Image (cartoon, rainbow, N blue to C red):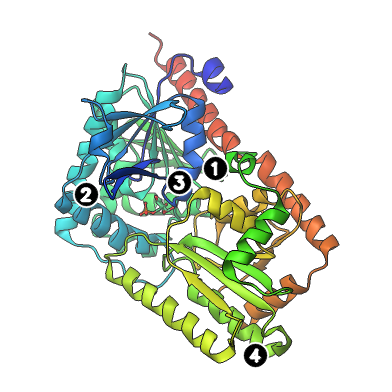
Amino acid sequence: RKILATELPDAQVIVVSNREPYIHNLKEDEVELVVPASGLVSALEPITRACAGTWVAYGGGSADHLTVDENDRVAVPPDDPSYMLRRVWLSDEEHAGYYLGFANEGLWPLCHIAFTRPNFRAADWETYQSVNRKFANAVVAEARNERPIVLVQDYHFALLPRMLREQLPDAIIITFWHIPWPNSEVFSICPWRERILDGLLGSSIIGFHTQFHCNNFIESVDRFLETRIEREDAAISYQGRTSLVHAYPISIEWPPAQLGKVPAVQQCRDRVRTRLGLAEGVKLCVGVERLDYTKGIVDRFRALDELFNRHPEWIGKVTVLQIAAPSRGTLPDYERLHRECERCAEEINQRYGYEGYTPVLFIAEHHTQRQVYEIYRAADVCMVTSLHDGMNLVAKEFVAARDDEQGVLILSMFAGASKELLEALIVNPFDAATMGEALQHALAMSSDEQRDRMRRMREIVRDNNVYRWAGSMLLDAARLRKRAEVELPG
Ligand code: G6P
């Protein structure tokens, strides 16, 4: 807020993402409020609240229509209205082509090394373009003047920056790509690669979580477009405009609002353990994510199998609780994953479980943020074993939830968070044997060692919180605007 007031006075902030921060659903004739499981949402929500901005997103809830005014707006959060959510409506065909098809069957697997083949279909591409146009029109309608700051979020909107630039030439457009960017060889698979790059270069700033992904992006631009690249400043000049490409590692608010609402650690432990029926002395390992093939959920179960193989003394003494919020469930790869997780959990339970002891509890249901924080606080170990992940905010949330300075984080080397949380036990999720050993190390770790590691990780998340993330992008944007004003006086 301070940066906005001093560096960018009077600038209106508009966030645009596919996923909305609050979903209204109809449940047995009642309107129910859901906060979706999305790292993007948990990061951007406190920022939008802090700058009283406007958030433009797809209205996908069954009661979303019932809660907006005549301009499709609703003030949120409902219990403490701080900003406007402007909903964009999509038909079933638009949702299928733009979201399920191009974004999630095309770009999502393209950008993640999870060995799922991307599917690119011309019809999905058509819909992706028209839906990007629809969102561009909604953003322009929300802009109070010609110089708003628009924060474009993620791979659903690669074309939006260019479309906005055409209509709002003086806007600051900051695009943040929340997922990895592949190397140029992989990126070349996309039949519309030049158009995607051209769309993104409508931005003033393009942000990624890591320098590595920035480099991949710059290489892709270099290979497929005629541009001038100044590598030192990471600036790309294209068609008379310059875009900066920088790394801004995303984070969470500190302290997280949820922490004020959950009971003490001991109480969380008692409640969660009773609910799960855990016997005295059984250690609890947790996994918390969307049910997604990039998250390495099956690999995590295999690590437990490996632990039991190598260290049978742990049989009966550890349970893995995996909660997985269903998303994109109608896509075949996601349905397949759901079945595979169930099958693998069942196999392990049959092999090692007995009356009163279940090694793997797999719950594919949405949990509220409050329930998730209770689980974090009840856990002995948190396993984040993504096969590939831009950042992964579960790792940071777990650390933030542990004000008792206890608990061990096992973290994939292929999650952006592993570049910051060096005191986690860093693992290669493709290597089951080493994962099993990491689990053994975590379960046997002394309370002192847990405290030392956790303390350091908490300092890092506290210092590099999401306000710093947004602040550094806004500062860079302010510098760009000043430079443009000097170059083009009047
Ligand atoms: C990832 C993506 C976000 C997305 C979230 C949830 O974090 O980067 O853009 O919102 O997953 O996925 P969903 O498809 O349910 O919105």
Q: What kind of residue is marked 4?
A: Asn
Of circles 1 and 4, the one toward us is 4
**Residue drawn at x 47%, y 28% as measured from the top left:** 80
Tag 2: residue type? Tyr
Q: Which of the two labelled residues, at mark 1 and mark 3, occupies the earlier sequence position?
A: 3
Instruction: Where is residue 473? Give x, y as percent.
Output: 52, 33
Give the secondary structure at mark 2. Answer: helix
Which residue is identified by label 3?
A: 40
The CB of the residue at mark 3 lies under 8 Å from ligand 1: yes
The residue positioned 46% from the left and 64% from the top of the image is 324
Is residue 95 found left or right of 297 in the rendered image?
left
| Lower position in the chain sequence, tag 1 or tag 2 | 2
Q: Residue at x 67, y 52 (%)?
A: 399
Foreground tag (3 vs 2): 3
Q: Nearer the viewer, mark 1 or mark 3?
A: 3
**Disc 2 designates what residue?**
128
Which sits in the foreground, 75 or 197? 75
**Residue tagged by mark 4?**
309
Pick whichever of labels 4 and 3 is earlier in the sequence: 3
Instruction: Verify CB contact (< 8 Å) between mark 1 and mark 3.
Output: no
Q: CA distance from mark 1 to mark 4?
A: 41 Å
The residue where tag 1 is placed is: 248
Q: Look at 73% across and 48% down and name the residue there.
A: 403
Spatial CA distance of label 1 from label 3 is 14 Å
Considering every residue shown, the one lying at the far right of the view is 448
Q: Nearer the viewer, residue 90 or 155?
A: 90
Q: Amino acid at mark 1?
A: Tyr
User: Which image quadrant is residue 261 in?
Assistant: top right
Q: Is mark 2 within 8 Å of ligand 1?
A: no
**Which amino acid, by three-letter code, is at mark 3?**
Leu
- Nearer the observer, disc 4 or disc 3? 4
